[in-house]
Every structure is written in C-alpha cells, then in structure tokens.
Amino acid sequence: MDFQNEKCVIVIDEQLPVGLLANTAAILGITLGKKLPDAVGADVIDQSGNEHLGIIEIPVPILKGTPKIIRELREKLYQPDFSDVIAADFSDLAQSCKTYAEFTEKMGQVSENALHYLGIAIYGTKKKINKLTGSMPLLR
C-alpha cells in the first residue's frame, strides 16, 4: 500500500449520542480493517518488554457529518469514478440487529433508499478522499 498517497476518513452523524457515536466509529474501523490488513503495523514492544498489537499506520480523522451528508457521500461512492475507493457504511438497520443473521436477512428486504446511515468510513487516494471530504470539519 502507498500510504503517502492514500487517505482514510470516517464520517459520523454528529447528532448521535456519545455511546452510539463511539460504537459507530468502532464498527466502521473494524469493518474497514478487514479490507486493509496491510494498513496495520507490526506488533511493538515497550521498554518494559510488554507486547502491544500494531495499530493502523496512517491517521484516521473522524469528521463531522449529518444524515444528509453521509447519504450523499454513500451515493457518490456508488458512481464509477469512485469504484476504487473502499467504503464501509453503518446504518440504523445494522445497529438495531442482535445477530449477523438477522442483519443479513433484514438487509435483503430493504432498499438502499430506506437506510438511515449513522456513519461511513472511506479509504482511497488522497485526491479522491479530499474531493469527497476535504471541506468537512473534524468531529470534536
């Protein structure tokens, strides 16, 4: 991977309660990580000799979004110009399910238009990610 020319961001609905916001970020990070195993560095050893698992080698800013902004991003990512961008989304439908089997069953019964996105994580070239999110503020 060319980490010098690639970028990863997570956009989350800023109106979510803090617990759901944290859960959304965690789910998106883990999900995107499945597609980017080379982005995680090697395990490290501290001065005391204790091992710590490697972390992602590039920054992952969390950006402030709204449901409308997140939906617009998701729709753009379906376009051919962004087919090389890796995207992971998290919706109210996914958040409400107790099991993955329930999630897969319910997703098969709902159109994309009916989903309410809580957040989206995207990874691709800096140029494309900046084009999509460059003017968005950090979530603080």
Image (spheres, grey):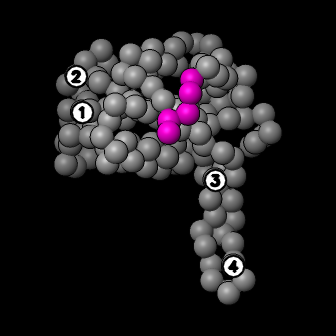
* Of the image marks 4 and 2, the number of the one nearer the N terminus: 4
The residue indicated by pointer 4 is 46
Q: CA distance from mark 4 to mark 1?
A: 41 Å
What element does badge 2 sit on? loop
Q: Bin the neighbour count of mark 2 within 10 Å (Cα to Cα): few under 14, some 14-19, many 20 and up.
A: few
Considering depth in this image, is 137 or 45 the residue closer to the camera? 137
Residue visible at 50% across and 39% down in the picture: 140
How far is mark 1 from mark 3, CA to CA? 28 Å
In the displayed structure, 75 sits above or below 39; it is: above
**In magenta segment, residue 137:** yes
Residue 99 is covered by the magenta coloring: no
Span colored in magenta: 136-140
Q: Earlier in the sequence, mark 1 or mark 2?
A: 1
Whichever of labels 2 and 3 marks the residue nearer the N terminus, that label is: 3
SS assignment for the magenta stretch, majority? loop
Q: Which mark is residue 93?
A: 1
Q: CA distance from mark 1 to mark 2?
A: 9 Å
Q: State which mark lies toward you, 1 or 2.
A: 1
Q: Which residue occupies 63% across, 83% down?
A: 50
Q: Residues within 10 Å of mark 4 (few under 14, many from 20)?
A: few
Which amino acid, mark 1? Leu
Q: Which residue is mark 2?
A: 110
First in sequence, mark 3 or 4: give its number: 4
What is the x, y in percent for residue 23? 36, 48
Q: Residue at x 58, y 13 (%)?
A: 80
Residue 84 visible in the shown view: no
> In terms of secondary structure, where does tag 4 sit?
loop
Q: Is residue 27 toward the left or the right of residue 123 in the image? A: left
Residues marked 4 and 1 touching at CB (< 8 Å): no
Report if the CB atoms under discs 1 and 2 are less than 8 Å apart. Answer: yes
Q: Earlier in the sequence, mark 1 or mark 3?
A: 3
